[in-house]
Image (cartoon, helix red, strand yellow):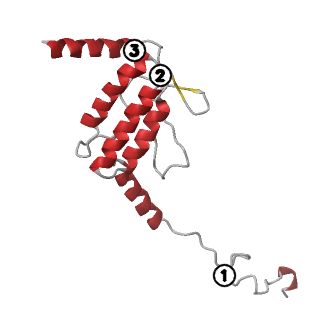
């Protein structure tokens, strides 16, 4: 009976927070980011994109979720996943406020349950491995641009005299 009551309370709290404008995410520059907007950083591995806090109310903890997404993109061992989830919990809780202190344990439980590598979700542990493999395969199949007879490209064409069209008979 207590578990059902606790679950109802948690669901009501999440509903209230997600429906209100209490949480608004900002990027590192302090600019507000719309819910569901993707953050792409070119300093990250190729193919990495973060949607912030997947399936969770927006808040002032977006950078915590983006760092967590990067860990999940890369994947690793079971202990690395547990450490990443713990960092997410600690980061969200450290943002301050009673809401974050209440949401941090719920986020932690959510990522522990739904972030396993064997679930076929787009946010599972190691989700970037397929993307990285695909990008590597695509880059190998692309042809390199031809540099034959282009001066200055190190192919020896700069040593050959170019015919002058004016000298033709």
The quadrant where residue 136 appears? bottom left
What residue sits right under mark 3 in the picture?
Answer: 17
Quick check: can you spot residue 155? yes
The quadrant where residue 82 appears? top left
**Residue at x-position 55% and y-position 69%:** 144
Above or below, 63 against 75 in this view is above
Q: Crowdedness of circle 3 by 10 Å Cα count: few (<14), some, many (20+)?
A: some
Task: Answer left or right for 73 relative to 160.
Answer: left
**Residue at x-position 50% and y-position 21%:** 24
Mark 2 secondary-structure assignment = loop
Nearer-N-terminus badge (1/3): 3
Task: Answer left or right for 77 relative to 136.
Answer: left
What residue sits right under mark 1 in the picture?
Answer: 155
Q: Which of 93 and 7 is in front in this view?
A: 93
**Residue at x-position 24% and y-position 35%:** 113
Q: Nearer the viewer, residue 83 or 152?
A: 83
**Residue at x-position 60% and y-position 73%:** 146
Quadrant including the C terminus: bottom right
Q: Crowdedness of circle 2 by 10 Å Cα count: few (<14), some, many (20+)?
A: few
* Disc 1 + disc 3, Cβ < 8 Å: no
What residue sits right under mark 2 in the picture?
Answer: 96
Mark pair 1, 3: CA separation? 64 Å
Q: Which of marks 1 and 3 is in front?
A: 3
Expressed as whole percent of the image width and height from the top left, the position of residue 141 reads 44, 66
In the displayed image of the protein, which residue is found farthest to the left? 1
Task: Answer left or right for 168 relative to 95.
Answer: right
Quick check: can you spot residue 125? no
Expressed as whole percent of the image width and height from the top left, the position of residue 104 reads 37, 26
Nearer-N-terminus badge (1/2): 2
Nearer-N-terminus badge (3/2): 3
Above or below, 42 against 164 in this view is above
Q: Total of numbered circles in the picture?
A: 3
């Amino acid at each position: 009976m207590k578990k059902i009551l606790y679950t109802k309370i948690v669901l009501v709290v999440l509903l209230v927070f997600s429906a209100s404008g209490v949480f608004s995410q900002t990027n590192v520059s302090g600019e507000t980011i719309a819910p569901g907007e993707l953050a792409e950083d070119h300093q990250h591995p190729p193919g990495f994109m973060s949607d912030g806090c997947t399936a969770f109310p927006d808040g002032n903890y977006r950078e915590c979720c983006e760092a967590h997404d990067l860990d999940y993109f890369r994947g690793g061992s079971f202990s690395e996943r547990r450490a990443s989830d713990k960092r997410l919990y600690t980061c969200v809780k450290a943002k301050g406020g009673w809401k974050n202190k209440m949401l941090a344990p719920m986020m932690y439980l959510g990522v522990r349950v739904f972030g396993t590598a064997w679930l076929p979700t787009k946010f599972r542990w190691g989700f970037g491995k397929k993307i990285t493999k695909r990008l590597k395969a695509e880059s190998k199949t692309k042809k390199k641009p031809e540099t034959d007879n282009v001066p200055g490209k190190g192919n020896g064409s700069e040593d050959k005299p170019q015919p002058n069209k004016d000298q033709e008979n």
